[in-house]
Amino acid sequence: MTFKSVLSNVELFASLSDSDLHDLEAVATPRHYSKGMLIFNEGEPVEQLLVLVEGRLRIFHSNDAGRQFVYGVVEPGVSFGELSLLCDEVRAVCAEADEDCVFLSISRQSFFALLDTHPQIKDAMLRNAAMIIRRLTRAVSDLALKDVYGRIRNVFEAMAVQTDEGLLIDDLLTQQDLADRVGASREMIAKVMKELVAGGYVETGRRRILILKKLPEHF
Amino acid sequence: MLEILKAIPLLQGFPDDQLEYILTTGLKRSMPKGTFLFREGDPAESMYVLIEGRARCFASDNQGKEFVFMVVEPGDALGEISLIDNEPRGWSCQCEEDSTFLMFSKQEFCEAMDREPHVKDLVVQNLAAMVRHLSTTMKNLALLDVYGRVRALFESMLINENGVEMVSQPLTQQAIADRVGSSREMIARILKELVFGGYIRLENKRIIIVQKLPERF
């Protein structure tokens, strides 16, 4: 897979012609990050647009006490930093490589040059921003209005895949991972999981969770 | 009317002809306190600029619990997201005071963005600010306890009037609860402790900050 084919799948660049994409690839620099490396940190100035072309990363917030809230996991084809570049702001979140990652890095200068020649990219930025706002609104509403169980249920429903055995979450999730995803303590997750197992709703195995029947509305 | 627009901090720096354009194109709508500008799930045909009053954006669950994640002040645009992605309203918006808006149809909004690159840049900036605000809200909800969120709310609303530090608007316990995602009872307890500890004083529904609020409760 060439970098160009990944770039063509990035929402921001969907309107670019083949030759434009070729030019863009020519000014982009590949960057490699090994699993576990911090890619950017909340509060850092933004100097380039990053496009994830290979691997997977985690977007999260953390506090001084080292607690993390993992907002999401991002797959290739997603761009980071275009809004901050345009509005001259710092990174709003942290990102860490969940697997070895390859990015294409586009400098501030190249990005602004591209915006000048292709103003339609701003329309894609608006659509992207609207999508992020809707997603964030759902996330904050869930945090404010749902209890821990309701949020665990959300994560399970989003991650479960239909297999021969039934609905399966096979993502090597530890209780701490789950706690970081729903914004709760590990102890709380352990309590909820124990109840779900006792109630015959789920079966937990070696870092996998099989959903046996529809999870209850309320805990 | 032009003077009202000019007095809005967010619209300062706008040339007169653009303000005139906003005034002549926008349809003036006045709404009493409590009116819904739109409700979650409504189809969307227009966007608004608040010129007087205040409105709150909130999500609610099916038991009527509300979470207010954004307060709209004069000069703020609202309702443009649905015109950008053609999806129904993602949340509800209600007037918190008697309010006046300028209303723009989807067509007017899109034409203005196409004709004036400056307008499009403003919309991008507005959305970027919203992303940032929501991201901070999310972080606070996930990583701070209720007291920490109350403190963050007070600090974000702090004004200084004649040397006295206070929260810029009168807030009921329920209003604070809806803004930080907690129960009224929990807020009552926290406020009581803060008063008892000599950190705040409640006067005419206003919250006066007597000394810097403690890091932890």
Image (tube, helix red, strand yellow):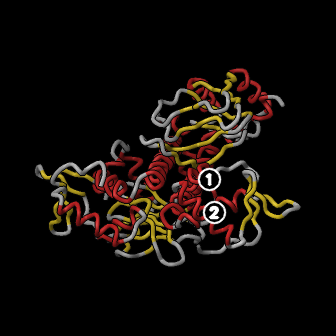
What residue is at 65 percent from the left and 45 percent from the top? A73
What residue is at 76 percent from the left and 40 percent from the top? A9
Classify 10 Å Cα crowding around label 1: few (below 14), some (14-19), many (20 and above).
some
- The percent position of residue B151, horizontal first and vertical second, equals 31, 54
Between B52 and A94, the one lying in front of the other is A94
- The percent position of residue B200, horizontal first and vertical second, equals 18, 58
Q: Is residue A65 above or below residue B169?
A: above
Q: Is residue A168 left or right of residue B14?
A: right
Quarter of the image for residue B71 reads bottom left
> Which residue reaches farthest left?
B162
Q: Is residue A180 left or right of residue A17?
A: left
Tell me whether the residue at label 1 lies in contact with that at label 2, contact meaning CB atoms closer than 8 angstroms.
Answer: yes
Mark 2 element type: helix
Q: Which mark is residue B15?
A: none
Tell me the quarter of the image containing the C terminus of chain B.
bottom left
| Camera sees residue B122 | no
| Camera sees residue B73 | yes
Q: Is residue A171 left or right of residue B88?
A: right
